[in-house]
């Protein structure tokens, strides 16, 4: 066997192993959700298909799964919109205006974002309690925005830095203001980067667990990850079929969204270098 074939075989074997490692838990989750018994892999049990767990998740009012899903969509959407709305003008100012210490500012934002959330959640809970915001959307949207904003700023800065500055000069000669340039020139040109940033921010907020656990108390603002984790408390035991069915219903939209826009997500993650 030639060296080239050996390398190709090793590459394919590694890719197959990574696929099995990554997809194995997801496949097991889906099979458990569709099985009458959660221990279908045990000897003498076997797999029997049922849709009862999915129906139970959607129709059992005590589980509040539709409310959890709605809360996740609203909170994630608002957080993504705020991140893009705040990071876009900031990235434009960093890449276009003669600001001293631009890189130091970006590095400082990145350094602040490295604080572990668990070290901040106690103080955050006290602040939200004094404001009367516990178990509200704003109690989650504002921390999510602050948590995701550094990543959004870095991605948009890298995209805006690739837009030719000659477009700004031409627009300034035509009498456009900086805000008009950002809205009518930069946004259309950097639309893929803005979309990628919003998508990443949405996914990050949708999957967040700690803040949602500490700052929400019931289905009025509780998100899907926390709601599924607390199914055990609702029943006094672990309803594995229902838990897995809810996990499948939650995971499928995010997976489909990631698969459809995977190229833009990868671009958003890899374009982290800032020019100039």
Image: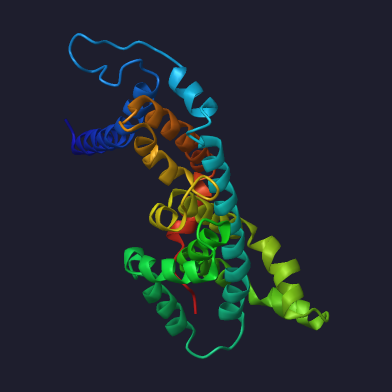
| Residue 123, x across and y down, in percent | 39, 71
Residue at the image position 21 percent from the left and 36 percent from the top: 10
Residue at the image position 37 percent from the left and 25 percent from the top: 241
Residue at the image position 49 percent from the left and 47 percent from the top: 218
Judged left or right of residue 206, residue 121 is: left
| Residue 80, x across and y down, in percent | 57, 58
Residue 104, by quadrant, is bottom left
3 lies above or below 112: above
Q: Report the front residue among 177 and 133.
A: 133
226 lies above or below 194: above
Please state, as top left, top right, bottom left or bottom right, where the N terminus lies in the image.
Answer: top left
Residue 168, by quadrant, is bottom right
256 lies above or below 33: below
Judged left or right of residue 262, residue 7 is: left
242 lies above or below 37: below
Residue 2, by quadrant, is top left
Q: Report the front residue among 52 and 174.
A: 52
| Residue 86, x across and y down, in percent | 60, 70
Residue at the image position 53 percent from the left and 28 percent from the top: 58
Residue closest to the far bottom: 100
Tell me if I can see residue 155 in this picture.
no
Tell me if I can see residue 236 in this picture.
yes
């Amino acid at each position: 066997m030639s060296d080239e074939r050996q390398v190709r075989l090793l590459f394919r074997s590694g890719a197959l192993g990574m696929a099995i490692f990554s997809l194995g838990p997801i496949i097991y989750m889906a099979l458990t959700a569709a099985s009458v018994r959660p221990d279908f892999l045990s000897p003498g049990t076997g797999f029997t298909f049922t849709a009862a767990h999915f129906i139970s998740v959607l129709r059992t009012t005590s589980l509040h799964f539709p409310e959890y899903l709605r809360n996740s969509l609203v909170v994630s959407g608002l957080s993504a919109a705020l991140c893009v709305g705040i990071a876009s003008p900031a990235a434009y100012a960093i890449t276009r205006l003669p600001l001293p210490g631009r890189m130091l500012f970006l590095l400082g934002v990145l350094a602040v974002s490295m604080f572990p959330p668990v070290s901040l959640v106690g103080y955050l809970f006290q602040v939200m309690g004094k404001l009367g915001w516990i178990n509200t959307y704003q109690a989650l949207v504002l921390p999510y925005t602050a948590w995701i904003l550094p990543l959004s700023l870095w991605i948009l800065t890298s995209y805006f830095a690739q837009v030719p500055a000659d477009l700004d000069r031409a627009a300034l000669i035509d009498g456009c203001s900086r805000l008009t340039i950002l809205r009518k020139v930069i946004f259309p040109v950097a639309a893929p980067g803005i979309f990628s940033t919003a998508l990443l921010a949405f996914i990050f907020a949708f999957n967040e667990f700690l803040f949602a656990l500490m700052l929400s108390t019931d289905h009025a603002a509780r998100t899907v990850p926390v709601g599924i984790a607390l199914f055990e408390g609702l029943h006094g035991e672990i309803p594995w079929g229902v838990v897995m069915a809810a996990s499948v219903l939650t995971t499928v939209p995010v997976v489909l969204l990631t698969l459809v826009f995977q190229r833009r997500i990868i671009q958003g993650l890899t374009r982290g270098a800032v020019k100039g």
